[in-house]
Amino acid sequence: MKHEIETDTGYFDSAACDLSAFTALIDQTANPSTVPNADDIQKNVPIYDMSRLRPSLENKERRRAIMAEWAHVLLSDAGVLVLRGAYEDTVVLDEATGIYERIIATEKLATGSGGDHFAASGSNDRIWNSLQKLCEEAPEVFLRYFANTSIAAACEAWLGPNYQMTAQINLVHPGGVAQQAHRDYHLGFQTAETSAEYPAHVHDLSPALTLQGAVAHCDMPVESGPTKLLPFSQLFRAGYAAWRRDDFRAVFEERHIQLPLTKGDALFFNPALFHAAGANRSSDVHRMANLLQVSSAFGRAMETVDRVKMCKLLYPHAMAAHQNGTLGVSNLKAAIAAAAEGYSFPTNLDRDPPKSGLAPETQQALFLRALAAGLDVHEFEAILDESRVKQSA
């Protein structure tokens, strides 16, 4: 639809996003014929009973057929699906919950609770990198937790083999506030200004790089605030430019759906789907979900590069060029872009949290800030070394 495309510039403009085109997309109704393996469709979301489908995942042809259906749902249909009973035995979830609660208590004593992207302050706890922390605390529990063919098939359906798993625990207590509507990582974690600098085709490709999932660690009735979802909203190409607009968020609040989940269910959705965690209006449900953020194997460079070393070597020459005017700002930015890391992730969000916005400062931004502030070589190198420590596992 040309009216939601980049108006001949190759880029999306937030002001040009067409709300009527968006509402036309979310007005669709799920077609049961496109999801023959689903056991139910609730509020346009296909529901898959894994107690029935799990044995089929051991057969290559049946597994591929199921995965192809899931990929179609995520790409071209509702954009979200639920795997009922993804965990056949929820004992391991209870064991992991106990471990996560101890981690939360320990981290609160040390540093206070972790921040939450897209959410106002509220009654919630976050464990960054719950994946590694569970493995460190209880490797045998980790083994049984992720020995899950349903979750593996969902990840492979969207990303192909050799995906990279990360996870964060989100625990929302009664009274916990809702998030605002948003899209997710990658482009969803950029500022509006940074997102607008990426060409339209990158907006199209970004959702194929990650898969969002959530494992329910407890029963989640609607009043406890399970994820608010807007089926079909991932189909709006300019959504990464539009999701911050008040009129798009108003439509989300009017039209979103929520599905109750049972302990052991898993929810997966396209990261471009408009979504938000709901408010916990219950009196006694402490809503815990393990938020799976799974990445494509292809999100990696071909060579390993010591960019910290390169920055240290480059800085005195860049400072001299900046001070004597032998290179203009645009030229310096081009050289720095070739040497310094321009992306905030991956990082250790316990030690390197976003201070203003959704992502920590990049190496390139630090380099430019140091030049502008006139930091000497030793000051710059000290900050670089500190940043490397913060980002390390």
Image (spheres, grey):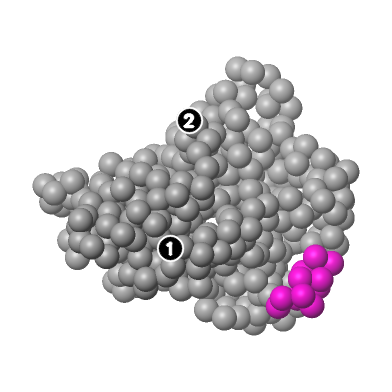
**On the picture, is 107 further left or further right than 176?**
right
Viewer-side residue, 344 vs 322: 322
Sequence order check, earlier mark of 1 and 2:
2
Q: Residues within 10 Å of mark 1 (few under 14, many from 20)?
A: some
Can residue 298 be seen here?
no
Q: Residues within 10 Å of mark 2 (few under 14, many from 20)?
A: few
**Residue under label 2:** 302
Residue 164, image quadrant: top right
Kind of residue sitting beneath label 2:
Met
Taking the spot 79% from the left edge, 62% from the top edge, the residue there is 100
Where is residue 297 shown, x and y percent of the image? 54, 34
**Residue under label 1:** 366
Taking the spot 27% from the left edge, 54% from the top edge, the residue there is 332
Q: Nearer the viewer, mark 1 or mark 2?
A: 1
* Residue 62 vertical position relative to residue 121 in the rendered view, above or below: above
Viewer-side residue, 92 vs 364: 364
Where is residue 227 shown, x and y percent of the image? 56, 62
Residue range of the region highlighted in magenta in the rendering: 102-112
**On the picture, is 79 further left or further right than 350?**
left
Kind of residue sitting beneath label 1:
Leu
**On the picture, is 347 further left or further right than 327?**
right
Where is residue 151 shown, x and y percent of the image? 66, 40
State yes or no: residue 106 in magenta: yes
Which element type, helix, strand or loop, lies under badge 1?
helix
The main secondary structure of the magenta stretch is: helix
Residue 244, image quadrant: bottom left
